Image: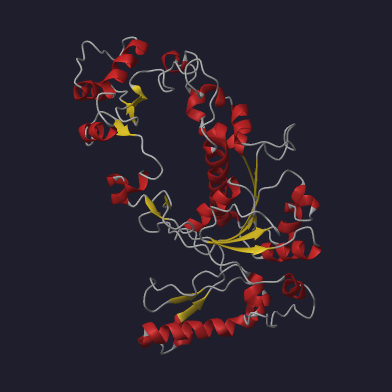
Amino acid sequence: MALRGVRVVELAGLAPAPFCAMILADFGANVVRIDRPNAPDIDRLGRGKRSIILDLKKPQGVDIVKKLCASADVLIEPYRRGVMEKMGLGPNILTKDNPRLIYARLTGYGQDGPFADMAGHDINYLSLTGLLSMLGRKEGPPTPPINLLADFAGGGLMCALGISLALLERTRSGMGQIVDANMVEGAAYTGSWIYSSQDISWLWGKSRGCNLLDSGAHFYNTYKTKDGRYMAVGAIEPQFYHQLITLLGLDPDVVGQMDDSDSMKKVLEAKFKEKTQKEWTEIFDGKDACVTPVLTMEEAPHHPHNAYRGTFIPSSTNGGQYEPRPAPYLSRTPGSVQERAAPLQMEERIAESFLTKKGSDMTGKSPHNNKMEDQLLMLPPPPVFEDDFPSTHFCVFPINNTQAHVSSFSSLMKRVTNHLEQTVPSQLEGIEECIAVIPHQV
């Protein structure tokens, strides 16, 4: 997958940051989430991640995070400005030990400015962008579109984009950087076209709910059907509008596209109430009238088009439910949903021993009979070998390039040898020559 081998440490937060980390995990990143003790179980975006409970109010917990970040590629933190610095986990400290670290900060208002320390939610962030003022029906109040635009599009998705850009830039400079992602600027950026088109009077020249794309036009609206369901109409272009009116059984000369929208809405409202949603769907499916049924969350996964493309997949966390597959689809390295891994079995007393001189060689044993290094590293390594390379080359990717992992290299080589014996025994001859060892760097 595209982000295979990228190691991510996520400090647990609410929706935007978990969504960002889930995107990275869906496309192959190794994500470990740091959970707080006694935190409520509201996680719904944990697929493909490992998790561990650490108390960051204790020095031991903070020290473990430092150790993790010393070998990580990305850190995602969702706290208000200054919280990480107070814990001793600010970028100046973590990047000193790991200058390649990409330090992603995801907040509501950004790292500076009058509102940087103020609490807020999606509706507050969206209101500051000016976009909320444009959302809503005629003569109605501004209506928040649930918490999609600021939290997820402007926050989590933009943060994932920033991290991806920083990873790409790091291949040239070798250096990490701080990603200052925030919901206000991310949502505003998402609305770039709306801002740049404000001078088009026929598009946005009227009050809220009276414009072309905000339910003001009769050909861009939703209509109730005979059975109380809805159809979505988006017949903007003249050729599409003509098909809409024709398939509705109306006269294009009587229901003109540029006629008074309020009057035309009444005509379309009456017409759509003559048939059920299913009946209208059968009429419009496959036609260029830009008319589709408004599906419920339960119906969407089973729509023929979505089912054909596999747009929704069985939920990895909630049995019987569905969730969207990773998007966009990449032809060679598509994303893949991995089940949420079981929490790492690591107790703080074990972790604390790692920070002592006695435990620093990482040779101790945990109560769970796993190597101390496996418990403390927590970040699952990239694939040990690449089967898709030419048959004469096998690449071994160490977890990182630090001395602490040299002791585990012999066991790594045994794993490679065992794999070769099972899959390509003809390559065993001269194994020292055909195995290339390279440090894992992205």
Q: Considering the image in quadrants, where does the C terminus appear?
A: bottom right
Q: How many numbered markers are drawn?
A: 0
x and y percentages locating residue 357 in the rendered image: 80, 78
As drawn, which residue projects farthest toward the bottom?
Answer: 429
In the image shown, does 442 or 122 lie closer to the viewer? Answer: 122
Residue 244 found in image quarter: top left
In the image shown, does 164 or 182 lie closer to the viewer? Answer: 182
The residue located at (61%, 27%) in the rendering is 127
Residue 427 in view of the camera: no
Left or right: 10 in relation to 434: right
Residue 62 found in image quarter: bottom right
x and y percentages locating residue 348 in the rendered image: 73, 70
Left or right: 410 in relation to 95: left
Residue 430 in view of the camera: yes
In the image shown, does 218 or 190 lie closer to the viewer? Answer: 218
Compared with residue 363, is residue 148 higher up or lower down, i.e. above or below?
Answer: above
The residue located at (27%, 46%) in the rendering is 304
x and y percentages locating residue 362 in the rendered image: 70, 79
x and y percentages locating residue 70 in the rendered image: 69, 64
Q: Considering the image in quadrants, where does the N terminus appear?
A: bottom left
Left or right: 262 in relation to 395: left
The residue located at (31%, 27%) in the rendering is 225
Residue 350 found in image quarter: bottom right
**Colour convention of the picture:** secondary structure
As drawn, which residue projects farthest toward the front?
Answer: 227
The residue located at (47%, 28%) in the rendering is 193
